[in-house]
Amino acid sequence: MQLTEEQELVRKTVREFMDEEIAPELPAADREPLSKAEAIDYMQTMAEIDVGPYGDADYEDPLTSTIVSEEIARVWPSLQVTMGMCLPVTMLDLFPATEQAYSEELANDEIVGCFAITEPAGGSDTKVPDTSARLDGDEYVLDGEKTWVSNAPIADVALVVAWDEEEDNRDMFLVDGKHADFETRELHKLGWKGSPTGQLFFDDCRIPAENKLSTAVLTALEDDDRESSFLSGGGPGGDPLNSMFASMRNGMASISVGIMQAAYEAALDYATDREVFDQPIGQHQLIQDKLFEIRAGLETGRLLSRHTAERIAAGDPEARMLSSLSKGWVCEKSVEVTDAALQVFGANGLSEDYPLERYYRDARTMTIPDGTTEIQKLIVGYELTDLQAYT
């Protein structure tokens, strides 16, 4: 897939910046979850090249966003996850009450956001959330619990999937800590060590009625533009939130591509530098077999995730199916690729002195968030057959 000159320039700029400014602080920076101050500092640093929630670049083209995600994840997946989950921060102009409350933090680039989707009893099932939103006068009252939420322990604002009791449908609601306190609890995990993860608890959490996302978007749009909004049902699959979910799923695939790229580069360097019996181990047939599998997985995953990004941008009816295909296949392939790369390193691959153990942990983590591989297979199956294998 040929990139445009502009996309290639973006790719090179992000790669050079990550190698020069971020990579020297690893792996130490990834050993513990980032504090809020640390996360803000890194995102302010990334804004120097207009990347992330504080940057000025507007990568509306999903393919360019995919390329940026690949390059950041090649060095530090945790940073890409932390920045990506701050998307609600870039949407605060839709929510005037919250935007005004955080005017100082917005002006100083000192605000963190998160998406709250997964629930303890629901896992990957987001169609009918247990978290409820009840209209009470000019406020919505949210009650429920979310879990495995990236950035939860450090977030100022959360975009929460909840069941709108008045409309009898799911929607998203912007909750901020200045209008309504919400409690958090940190969770520890195998990979993405630098990205803080936790639970969110909403108990009689009151927010302005205009903080319902569908209401906010439709209010902001001109009448003749409403059909173009994904919230009016124009997204993949005919569901208002599917467009957002499709982008998030394919975003996970692009992170996996970045991890595979890092594993490939490390394995290739090691295979050509490491000598046993007076010859590079890369001269052995079995090592060359590993390199074949690694490169094949990397190239195939990159093509699938970038193709999916193009289909999302084009509003292709198959974009929902492709995003699940991409998320499921590429994330699983990243586990196989990093496993093969770790094997090239032998015992050194298990050592924290080398990066492969981190690549492997991060890759293994990719197969679960934003819908497990098993759920992605069921979504693809439904899209292909129009037969529902799950309720």
Image (cartoon, rainbow, N blue to C red):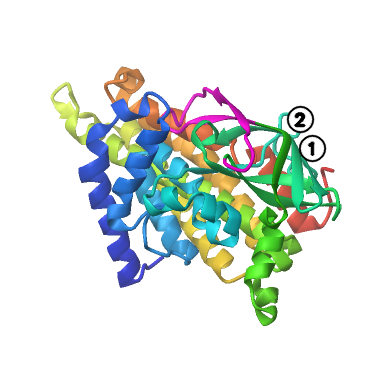
Q: CA distance from mark 1 to mark 2?
A: 8 Å
Pointer 1 residue: 130
Which stretch is magenta? 178-200
Residue 277 in the image: above or below residue 378? above
> For residue 229, which quarter of the picture?
bottom right
Residue 388 in the image: above or below residue 185? below
Q: Residue at x 59, y 28 (%)?
A: 184
Provide residue 303's location: percent of width, then percent of height: 46, 57
Q: Confirm or deny contact between disc 1 and disc 2 (CB under 8 A).
A: yes
- Tell me the SS state at disc 2: loop
- Tell me the SS state at disc 1: loop
State whether residue 315 appears in this view.
Answer: yes
Residue 165 in the image: above or below residue 220? above
Q: Residue at x 70, y 75 (%)?
A: 227
Dot 2 crowding, Cα within 10 Å, few <14, some 14–19, many 20+: few
Q: Residue at x 82, y 44 (%)?
A: 389
Provide residue 241's location: percent of width, then percent of height: 69, 56
Question: Amino acid under label 2?
Answer: Ala
Question: Amino acid under label 1?
Answer: Asp
Q: Which mark is residue 121?
A: 2
